[in-house]
Image (cartoon, helix red, strand yellow):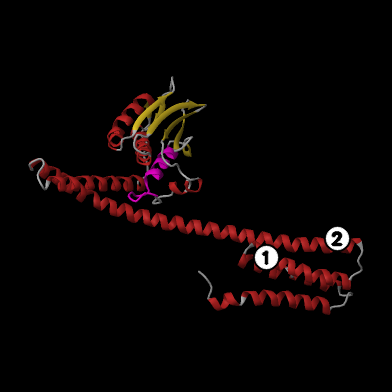
Amino acid sequence: MKPPARYTRLRLPLVLLLVFFISWLHFRLGPDQAVAHVFLQDFYFLPIILTGFWWGPWMGLLIALLVSGIYAPYVALVHDLTPATMTSAATQMILFMAVGLLVGWLRRREQSHQNMARQAENLAAVGRAVASVAHDMKTPLMAIGGFSAQVKRKMEPGGPEDHKLEVVIEQTARLEGMVKEMLDFSRPLELHRHAVDLRDLAASTLEVAAPLAEKSLVNLTSDLQQPLPALQADTERLQQALINLINNAVQASPPQGEVDLSIWRQGNEVVLAVSDDGEGVPPAERLQILIPFFTTKKEGTGLGLPVVNKIAEAHGGRLEIGDNNPHGAVFRLVLPVES
């Protein structure tokens, strides 16, 4: 909770008052009050720590420099400038600056962690709400799609209302897909592992993705290394991840473009890579697109890639994003090979 504005405005005057009050006491005491001077010079840490805590490392350093600028003339006026005195004074001023920077940096890190925790909490609340809404939408959408398909079958093909009903069915199917993405992301993954033949997985995945590629005039190709190991994984989840990646690649590619599914072994890992001929993913967006609900598309939930990443992590692997030279992007699903 933020403090009232009137308290915030009093912070800087308080810090400056402390600095000048401690300095006044320093100069007021004579050189014979050595114990009191040591006690007062340690009091300088109070305004420095407050500044770093309230405004961060650079303001902490600035007040530490101000303190050092006042402390140095005091040392020159009150003490004999012996090597021991100068070394002690220099060490004290370095400590002032180090404490200002360190306290400010720790405070900034704490605030960053607090912000991340708040964002995660808000995201979890949004996820629960979305999952609840998606669950409630699932049954009505299935009913709309089913009844619309039945009515269309009884209508005369090519009639004036036939096209409108086709649009209803297509949009209902799109909404069902969005609801499925939401539910897939909100539910915990339960993997049913068994030996997966990667060649069969690639063939069935390309077969499922072919209609969208044909509609978008995009060519699907595959490049499978021989031989490939049998992977202990959940076939359905892996296919879901690959279809998500291929559909994204098809949508990103221009007409007559090419989307390639490549699989090869890399040490103790298997790489399933999907590359496209699109505009690629800017480096600044490569972490953002894995955040739930972040999307650069006009349509979509922003959950496709987070679901893929969730599937990869559930298998003990990872999702990597790179460039497909000379242009385009490549998404690599990297999974460990069980010995």
Residue 197 in view (yes/no)? no
Is 76 situated left or right of 276 in this image? right
Is 19 situated left or right of 197 in this image? right
Which residues are the magenta region? 296-314
Label 1 packing within 10 angstroms: few (<14), some (14-19), many (20+): many
As drawn, the residue found furthest toward the top would be 227
Q: Which residue is mark 2?
A: 87
In the rendered view, would you say 76 is above or below 115? below
The image shows residue 314 at horizontal and vertical percentages of 42, 39
Q: CA distance from mark 1 to mark 2?
A: 23 Å
What kind of element bears circle 1?
A: helix
Q: Which residue is mark 1?
A: 60
In the rendered view, would you say 44 is above or below 164? below
Type of residue at label 1? Gly
Discs 1, 2 touching: Cβ within 8 Å: no
Type of residue at label 2? Thr
In the rendered view, would you say 201 is above or below 137? above
> Residue 120 appears in which quarter of the rendering?
bottom left
Q: Is 229 included in the stretch rendered in magenta?
A: no
Residue in the picture at 68% in, 60% down: 101
User: Looking at this view, is 188 or 318 the one in front?
Assistant: 318
Label 2 packing within 10 angstroms: few (<14), some (14-19), many (20+): few
User: Looking at this view, is 303 or 43 the one in front?
Assistant: 303
> Residue 152 appears in which quarter of the rendering?
top left
The image shows residue 6 at horizontal and vertical percentages of 56, 78
